[in-house]
Image (tube, rainbow, N blue to C red):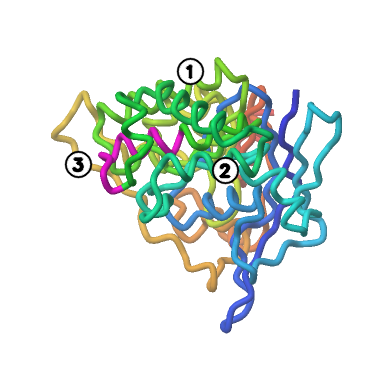
Amino acid sequence: MTLLKVENLTLGFDTDEGRITAIDDVSFELEAGEIMGLVGESGSGKSVMAKSLMQLNARNAVYSPTSRITLHDDENGREIDVLSLTKAQDLKVIRGGSISMIFQEPMASFAPAITIGDQMVEQLLLHTSMSKREATDFSIEMLNRVGISDAKHRFKQYAFELSGGMRQRAMIAMALSTRPKLLIADEPTTALDVTIQAQVLDLMKDIVAEFGMAILLITHDLGVIAQTADRVAVMYLGKIVETGSVRQIIRTPQHPYTKGLLNALPDLDDLGAPLTPISGDIPSPLERPSGCVFHTRCSQIIEGRCDVALPEVTDVGAGHGVSCFAVTSSVETSV
């Protein structure tokens, strides 16, 4: 069942320098019980796109008239048009209700002067019909379920009293306590050591199996994606340039950008081999390139084409789509 459908999402920010395009004509679908990875360098628009799903971007955000985000509400048998929600009461349906989000840095996400428990209870009182006693018991239960020892004690502590791994687990427990249909995990393993990182990733997979929810996993780490995701979307400068199953993306990447991301990973079979970074830097959104947004850094550029026109999505396999003229030309030649 399709839980989330994003169609032609285009988002800009009005600034003193003019309108900056952060997301450009993005479309994708997310199924219930699926983990979708969203990868790309810093500045690709991953977090901005994720915040759009909950209307959490700044007030100077402007969506194009053709943009549409639809969330399937199976409890009430209706489709929620996310971008049409304007009132605070209506937005509660998606913010912490049907959709929850794990932010990049839990230390900055928890209120420092309020205990972890009080923050968990407050959101349950807002989004559910629980009493304060019921919300307290359920919050402690959720802390237990994400593997936090002595949950009753941790419930009364502040964020700064917890280790990085515990804060991340507490953030996951808080995000899950409202039983959302979609969990957005924005760099959930950043700054965690590899042992805690593995525990958090295993926990997320268990969550999907137990609750049947979908997860949008945002990261720049393809190793995390390989371990966790079912499908992958590769994002560059506000556009999705390649989508496919995790096996397709990792084993048979087609877009030069995806290949560059994979080539930049260390080779465990040859630790002495030099890293191969993608040449150049991601352009500023204020100086967005014409044509294919990646052509300024691409090693397979077709002069007079890539720098002028936008490539359409080419189907190179079952559910494997690529936006690249070099790939299109190769497919046309083989046919």
Secondary structure at badge 2 equals helix
Residue 95 in view, yes or no: yes
Residue found at x 75% / y 46%: 69
In this view, the residue farthest toward the left is: 272
Image quadrant holding the N terminus, namely top right
Q: Which residue is under mark 1?
A: 206
Of the pair 197 and 150, the residue shown nearer to us: 150
Q: Is residue 183 left or right of residue 271?
A: right
Whether 167 is among the magenta residues is: yes
Residue 39: mark:
none
In front: label 3 or label 2 = 2
Q: Which residue is under mark 2?
A: 123
Q: Is residue 141 left or right of residue 309?
A: left
CA gap, disc 3 to disc 2?
49 Å
Q: Is residue 108 left or right of residue 292?
A: left
Q: Which residue is under mark 3?
A: 274
Looking at the image, is mark 1 or mark 2 earlier in the sequence? 2
Where residue 197 sits in the image (x, y, percent)?
Answer: 32, 30
Tell me which segment is drawn in magenta.
160-172
Of the pair 88 and 13, the residue shown nearer to us: 88
Magenta stretch: dominant SS? helix
Secondary structure at badge 3 equals loop
Secondary structure at badge 1 equals helix
Image quadrant holding the C terminus, namely top right
